[in-house]
Amino acid sequence: MTESLIFFALAAFILLGAVRVVASRDLVHAVLWLAVVLVLTAVMFLMLGAPFLAGVQLLLYTGGVITLMLFGVMLTRRHHEIGVEVDSSRRLPGALGALALFGAMACAIFRTDLPAWPSSAPVSALEIGRAFLTDHLIAFEVLSILLLAAMIGAIVLGRQSDFGDEPETVYRKGGRP
Amino acid sequence: MTMQTLLLLTSALFCMGIYGVLTRRNAIALLLSVELMINAVTINLVAFSRFGDGVTGQVFAVFTIALTVAEVVVGLAIVILLFRWRREIAIDSANELRH
């Protein structure tokens, strides 16, 4: 009883936060609401018997991704854009498309015979680590290569030398202004 | 907390992400909406692991989270590059491949 009460409260707050993420006019607010949604998702992971994932979610998402997003927002906005970042002309088709998709998925969910009660015990970090290093070893290594490639890609993309208006470009091309 | 309510919750989250992708013009707001969608999928994976076999779903969820982080890093690098080039990040303005 208590558990389902907590679950529904959590679900309501997650949905509320998600609405604010897609509808906030100020992007900084949208990012902070996304942080709320991600933290509540971590709590939901705890309820679903995934303490390791809850920790990873808090460390990676709310620690890393939100900070990066805030940097991105603040590095790329200009004064006259603050508060007018939603294009209202496409709201109706967007809402219709999303509602249609939700209707289709809800139909599929109601028609499928789903299990009502949890069938497995909570999974400890030990079990996940063992699964990574035995059954899913190759995928794990490929993932580390992917992370390395993403890091190198971000560094290459973020270099300042490709566009003409930076002073650094002039310096690198031989110091001739 | 049944499987059905969990799946309904994640579909609603996913559709809100879709709505954000369809309506937002700012590239970073678009990335935020994609985050919402990936978050919904991750909850789904964990739910299936809880109501199914246990470990595999959570291993998949860890993969999803790591992939999301890589996506955000590269996506933000591209957005900042776009800003440096066009001085704005409205996705409508990014309509050519040369500079």
Image: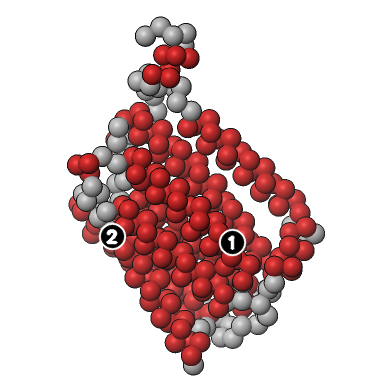
Chain at numbered mark 1: A
Q: CA distance from mark 2 to mark 1?
A: 27 Å
Q: Secondary structure at mark 2?
A: helix
Q: Which residue does the image show at 43% across and 19% down from the upper left?
A: A168
Q: Which residue does the image show at 69% across and 72% down from the upper left?
A: A124
B73, B5: nearer the viewer: B73
Q: Which residue does the image show at 39% across and 28% down from the upper left?
A: B97
Q: Secondary structure at mark 1?
A: helix
Q: Which residue is mark 1?
A: A56
Q: Is residue B41 above or below residue A28?
A: below
Label 2 Cα neighbours within 10 Å, binned few <14 / some 14-19 / many ≥20: many
Discs 2 and 1 share one subunit: yes
Determine the residue located farthest toward the bottom in the rendered image.
Answer: A1
Q: Is residue B90 above or below residue A124?
A: above
Chain at numbered mark 2: A
Tell me, for residue A23, which label it has, or none: 2
Q: Amino acid at mark 2?
A: Ala
Left or right, residue B37 beside residue A24: right
- x and y percentages locating residue B23 in the rendered image: 29, 53
Left or right, residue A149 beside residue A37: right
A10, A117: nearer the viewer: A10
- x and y percentages locating residue A70 in the rendered image: 39, 49
A39, B75: nearer the viewer: A39
Q: Is residue A134 above or below residue B12?
A: above
Q: Amino acid at mark 1?
A: Val
Q: Nearer the viewer, mark 2 or mark 1?
A: 1
Tell me, for residue B79, which label it has, or none: none
Left or right, residue B36 beside residue B47: left
Q: Is residue A90 visible?
A: no
Q: Which residue does the image show at 48% across and 28% down from the upper left?
A: A159
